[in-house]
Image (cartoon, rainbow, N blue to C red):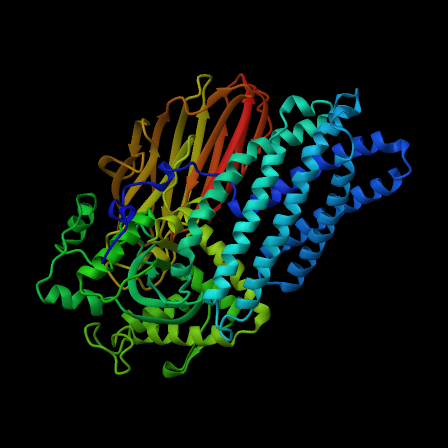
Amino acid sequence: MAHTALKARPNMRLSEMKPRRGQSGKWRLFLLAALLVVLLFTSVGGVLAYRASTVTYPQDMAMAQQGIQHLERAVTLLRTLQHDPLNTTSIGQARLEFSTANSDFSTLSDAINAIPTASDLLPVYGAKLHAARFLLPAAQHLARAGLAGCMLLSLLGTAFHNPWQSSGLTKVQMVQVMTDVQQAMGELQLAINAATHLQAADVQFDARIAKAFAQMQQYLPMVKLWMTDLTQLLPALPAILGVGTPSNYLIELLDSTELRPGGGFVGNYGIATLSGGHLLAADITDVDLLDRPFYGSGGRIPYPPQYQWFSNFLATSSWSLRDSNLDADFPTAAHYAETNYALEGGKGTFQGVIAITPQFIEQALAITGPVSVPEYQQVVTASNLIDLIHYYQLGAGAQGPDTVASPDGHSSLRKRFTSLLALHFMQQLRQMPTARWPALVQLLLHGLQAKDIQLSFNAPAAEQALHQLQFDGAIEATSGDEVMLVDANVAGDKANHYIQNVVHDQVTLDAQGDALHHLSMHYSWTTPGNIYGTHLYRDYLRVYVPKGSVLHRQNGWTPSTTSKAYGYTVWSGVFTLSFGQTLTINLSWTVPAVATYGTAGWHYSELVQRQAGITRSWQMQLVLPTCARNVRPSGSLRLLATNTVDGVDMAAWAQPLTQNNLSSVEYLC
């Protein structure tokens, strides 16, 4: 199987190629729109004041206000698509608002251009007139970009309004999609060009304009980066969506109750086929039907050096698809999944890999409703999903070995229930009322953010676009403080379903910008349940911290190794836990000079990354230097009451870690 250069080098980080961003790229266009509206409103007011001596002033003022209102309403309508992306009514209304705004701004622009440019030298209103000569065209181009975007959304809404009954995107429609995207980006670039003709000094006559202009300048590089990525993605879209020729994806169903770094043991796999962006089929089968025959015939796949720890714990000499996700960086794990699949004799080539956790299936069942599996006389709900799967795969309900295919040929005898459940779940999706599709689309987006769905594309441009949207499941890198905990169940049981994990991280900043961490990881196994394996849980735990961090103290685990990965220093250790026990692991370390000083004062940020398949309860407390004042937290951080004894300011956040969490604080010292 051929792999791209990116896939052939799994340790290459996409985050080293381009900087990460704090917000999803798809809404930056709306932010830019809002900023341009603010600039436009103030500048147009000045120009109309200049023309107040004419009889057209009242009409011009009314038109300016109407244009701004139409643009704002269009942006508001597009924002509602976050909750209902295929709502053709909202798309049509937004298109009308953009069209009307474009007409109003065009009329005003013609009027402004009729004023001699020498008027820009006049006192008071000359500067505003000069600014309006660029801001009005920027607003026009922005409205036209919105029109092109609405045409694109309307086409997609029609094609995917009912994903099971329509034929999906055709080659002709795909050409139109590319045309609409290129037109929207072209108009947006023209809007950016018009706005960037102005310097900060040109807008200092009004504090509101100056502030909005500064914000716009801050976000312009991000918007340009997003446009570049989208341009590179367009040629890869037909292959990704299966336009013209169907596309295939390797599907991994993860068992998070047997936790692995990539989200869970790969118990079942399958192939999903897309045609025109529509899912044609998704067959699920037992991974042992691939792994065991390969191993039984004498086949061997050696473990890479970085995963030798797993081979040592499980006493296995050959790697396989089911154990391919030993890395929390999903692009890396996906590369190895495809590689092992091919080496074990798997047929076909793929456009990418999709991994799904039980948490996503549970949430999807809340939307589709319970799924009946008549062959077993069972009704599967979110609350009994995991228990039923384990009962029929590992418990008294198992009907045979995993080395014998079931009579229907879909899976092994042992995992036939899971295969049939997947089949009936897909049938229920096809019959689901159209009104529920927006909720499912929202769940898909949330799943990507939470790593309950992990997606990797083989096309470099497509993978880069995923990375910019923070949908690639990669281990991220930022310029600030970072921490990520990665557990691996090396006991071979299903105990993770019953083990609770609470983390407390106290971070103390000193006057030099050093951060001292006191991290406590509390594991508790007090909930009873069938774990289908050894009753001594063993965990290989890795802690990712910024490179250059200095470890001071560790207890509660058996230390293993210190290594480097993805730009991090990684400390690892092993611990065991039995039912009824609790355990606390403590680590203390310093990250030198992680708080930085600039023109606005001191800045500190911390990125806490989630491992797929586990939801930890996370508590973070930040203790600021005694000299800190004018403290401004952001993200999840909230400022606590100042300690009146020693005058130390503190900020904190506490919540389940359902997705990566980036928080920061600015202060003077």
Q: Pick whichever, 245 or 547, lies toward us.
A: 245
Residue drawn at point x = 39 percent, y = 57 percent: 527
Residue 28 position, x and y percent, is: 56, 43
Q: Pick whichever, 77 or 578, lies toward us.
A: 77
Residue drawn at point x = 26 percent, y = 57 percent: 338
The reply, left or right, for residue 33 in relation to residue 618 is right
Residue drawn at point x = 56 percent, y = 21 percent: 600
The reply, left or right, for residue 92 in relation to residue 598 is right
Residue 533 position, x and y percent, is: 25, 61
Q: Pick whichever, 73 or 336, lies toward us.
A: 73
Residue 378 position, x and y percent, is: 41, 78
Residue positioned most to the left: 298
Quadrant containing the N terminus in the rendered view: bottom left
Answer with the quarter of the image where residue 571 lies.
top left
Answer with the quarter of the image where residue 492 lies.
bottom left
Vertical comparison of 431 with 234: above or below: below
The reply, left or right, for residue 627 in relation to residue 142 is left
Quadrant containing the C terminus in the rendered view: top right
Q: How many marks?
A: 0
Vertical comparison of 391 with 316: above or below: below
Vertical comparison of 221 with 399: above or below: above
Residue 84 position, x and y percent, is: 60, 60
Residue drawn at point x = 74 percent, y = 35 percent: 113
Q: Pick whichever, 392 or 203, lies toward us.
A: 203
Q: Is residue 616 visible?
A: no
Q: Is residue 181 visible?
A: yes
